[in-house]
Image (spheres, helix red, strand yellow):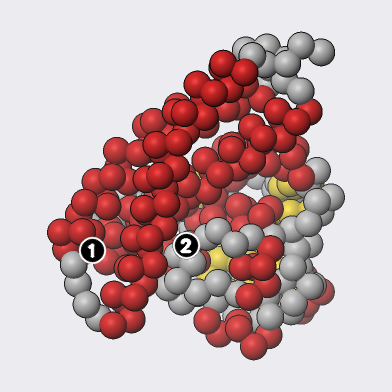
Amino acid sequence: MVSLPVGKLVELFLRLKSSFLIYRNLKIWLLVNKLMFFSKKENNSKNEFILMAAHQLRSPLSNIRWALKLTLAGDFGAVTEEQAKMLGRAYQSAGSMSGLIDDILNISKLDEGKLVYNFSPVSIVDLIEKTMQLFSDEISRKSIQLIFEKPSLSISVKGDSEKIKIVLQNLIDNAIRYTPEGGKVTISLKPDKMFLEVMVSDTGIGIPLNQQKKIFERFFRANNAIEMCPGGSGLGLFIIKNIIEKHGGRIWFSSLDESARNTLQSDAGGKENKGTIFHFTLPYNK
């Protein structure tokens, strides 16, 4: 097999270098912002600069991820196994950067009350299927089954499709991220009289009992999650809880082995190493 020319690899990673330096600065901003949050201090000028940088990073980062994906697919020539591993790690890091940028921009809008909602009828089945397509590369890399127990009929809920997509992306991403290779992630729906319950279950690491009360708090990450995946903002679940509550719904979690006992009113927690089910509800479109 002819390997990808070294020159092309060098060019690609030089383009990555400047973006990852900004990524490092965004991680520093996140730490500073966390300290500021707990000490109740403000620094608007620095926040505005970082938010501007986050906005400016979005387009070049998309280009970098696209270039890495095409390179991994062999569009620019065959790659060796060693090159594929290196490029794969870069692609994962770029994905982490993208997630961090989204979290920073969303939490900023949330704090400033600028997260605008446009409620309309949403086909939840179509939205789930479109969102699942975003994870084709990751589930292939980890040999994870991503299953949607699709109902026979279409179901319409009232909500903001872009915000519901954020919720689905976060929960599916977490489920894949914290599930070992060869595991399974399942999405299912449970109709009720007033609300539709959406469930995202995994066969992952679960949530330690002594940390469950903090799981939806800003910046919080469970110890086993940090150990398995050191990167992460700790903002995702905080953001999506706010989104679901803005829709008039609620969100909670349980252990995979407790699912048979859960009802719409259940507040059962999870268990470590038992897999987790995240549940959230949305009102029907009437």
Q: What's the amino acid at mark 2?
A: Ser
Say which residue appears at 39% left-offset and 31% top-offset: 60
Query: Going by the image, does 172 lie left or right of 36?
Result: right
The kind of residue tagged 1 is: Gly
Could you say which disc has been placed on residue 233 in the image?
A: 2
Mark 1 crowdedness (10 Å alpha carbons): few <14, some 14-19, many ≥20? few
Where's residue 105, x and y in %?
33, 53
How far, Cα to Cα, is label 1 from label 2?
20 Å
Q: Is residue 126 visible?
A: no
Residue 206: percent from the left, percent from the top?
A: 72, 71
Q: How far across and down, in percent of the image, does residue 32 sit? A: 33, 68
Between discs 1 and 2, the one toward the N terminus: 1
Q: Nearer the viewer, residue 80 or 48?
A: 80
Q: Secondary structure at mark 2?
A: loop
Q: Is residue 63 left or right of residue 205?
A: left
Say which of 140 and 91 sits in front: 91
Pick the front one: 178 or 23: 23
**Residue positioned 37% across, 54% down in the render:** 26
Q: Is 7 displayed left or right of 273 in the figure?
A: left
- In terms of image quadrants, where is residue 228? bottom right
Q: Quadrant of residue 255?
A: bottom right
Residue indicated by mark 1: 113
